[in-house]
Structure formats: structure tokens, C-alpha cells
Amino acid sequence: MILYHFTSAAHLRGIHQYGLTVGDVVTDIAGFKGKVGVWLTTSPTPEGQGLGGTIVDKSDFRLTVDVPENNLLQRWNKWAREKLSQETRVALDAGDIERTDYFFVYFGWLPTDRILDVASTITGRAEMDWGRERPQSHLAPGVPFRERYHWQRRTLRKVHEMLTLMTAEPVGGLH
């Protein structure tokens, strides 16, 4: 099945090195729990995909991916109805997400050879040498498939720490 994955320039080299290995699929918003899965879509455009809210622009590049049709591939809406609480689904569907009908999650590894094309969403042109070195300040390290669960625990811990800091009571009651 041909699906799309959107990502930032910072993540291209790591994806080229290891393939699509990680993505955070929240399963319990209140409990900071989740699964590791790669987000995919049938939509060829990044609008309405919920890509905002990060320090990198995840709408920079569109990867065209040949995804195996097996039990690791799940249509998001069906899977979420069966696996997530109503509270978690509502929270995840808030914001700039408009196209959940187009979402899939792959709970496995999509090696680099499954990526058929990488195109700039700005120019529309194919990125022929998409695994090239980019300035180090812009690179996000790739995640080998065997390290995906460690990556997820670290990510969830960072999110929990940031949210705790954001909701902490100001010292001395000053706002």
C-alpha cells in the first residue's frame, strides 16, 4: 500500500540511515503512556496532519512509502476507537489535526528500501540525495529499530518533565 510520511529536514539523514523506526502513539494522555509506531497518511499534502507543535518543521518533506499490508498496519480511527479512552482520543484530535480519516500507524519497522520517493513540500521537487549530511545544528539523530523503546521512554519522560514545569505553581505565588 502506498502511503505518505511527513518529516523535517533534520530527520532525513537518520531516516536514510535506519528507515522509519519510531513515532509516538499516545495511548493514555493522562498516564503518559504510548506505543511506538510510524505515522502515515493517504494524503499527499501536509495540511491538517497535526505536524505542528515541535521545534522542527515536520512538513518539510514528504516520503512516499510502500507499506506492507499486514497486521502491523492499522487504520488510526478504527484502532483508536478500540484501544484508547475517549479522553485520550479527544485530546489527540485537538489542534491542527483535521484529517484523521487519512491516518495509519505502522507498529513495525519500515526499512529505507521501502521509501520510494522523498520530495520537498516547498518546491515539489524530488530530493535525490536525501541522505546527505546537513549542518550538524539541524540534524536529529536517527533511531535504530532495536533502540525504539528506549527512545520512547526518553521522549515520554521529557514530555512529562516539560508539562510538569509548565503547570508548576510559581514560587511565592507570583504570576
Image (cartoon, grey):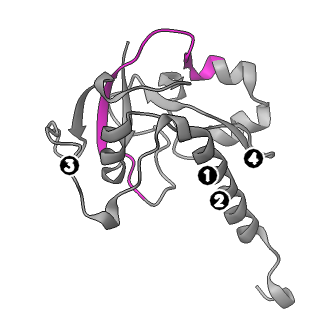
Q: Secondary structure at mark 2?
A: helix
* Quadrant the C terminus occupies: bottom right
- How many other residues sit within 10 Å of disc 1, few (<14), some (14-19) or many (≥20)? some
Residue identified by numbered label 4: 32
Residue identified by numbered label 2: 158
Q: Position of residue 127 (x, y in %)?
A: 17, 40
Q: Is residue 171 above or below residue 136?
A: below
Measured in 3D between alpha carbons, the distance from the residue under mark 4 to the one under mark 2, in whole angstroms, is 10 Å
Q: Amino acid at mark 3?
A: Arg
Q: Is residue 63 above or below residue 120?
A: above
Inspect this view and state whether residue 94 appears.
no
Which residue corresponds to the image point at 34% horizontal and 54% vertical from the top-left? Answer: 10
Which residue corresponds to the image point at 46% horizontal and 9% vertical from the top-left? Answer: 69
Residue 143 is covered by the magenta coloring: no
Q: Is residue 156 above or below residue 79?
A: below
Q: Is residue 165 above or below residue 81?
A: below
Q: Nearer the viewer, mark 3 or mark 4?
A: 3
Q: Secondary structure at mark 3?
A: loop
Q: Nearer the viewer, mark 4 or mark 1?
A: 1
**Circle 1/circle 2 CB separation < 8 Å:** yes
Specify start and end residues of the magenta stretch as a single range.
Answer: 56-78
Q: Amino acid at mark 4?
A: Phe
Q: Which sits earlier in the primary sequence, circle 3 or circle 4?
A: 4
Which residue corresponds to the image point at 50% horizontal and 42% vertical from the top-left? Answer: 50
Q: Amino acid at mark 2?
A: Lys
Q: Amino acid at mark 1?
A: Thr
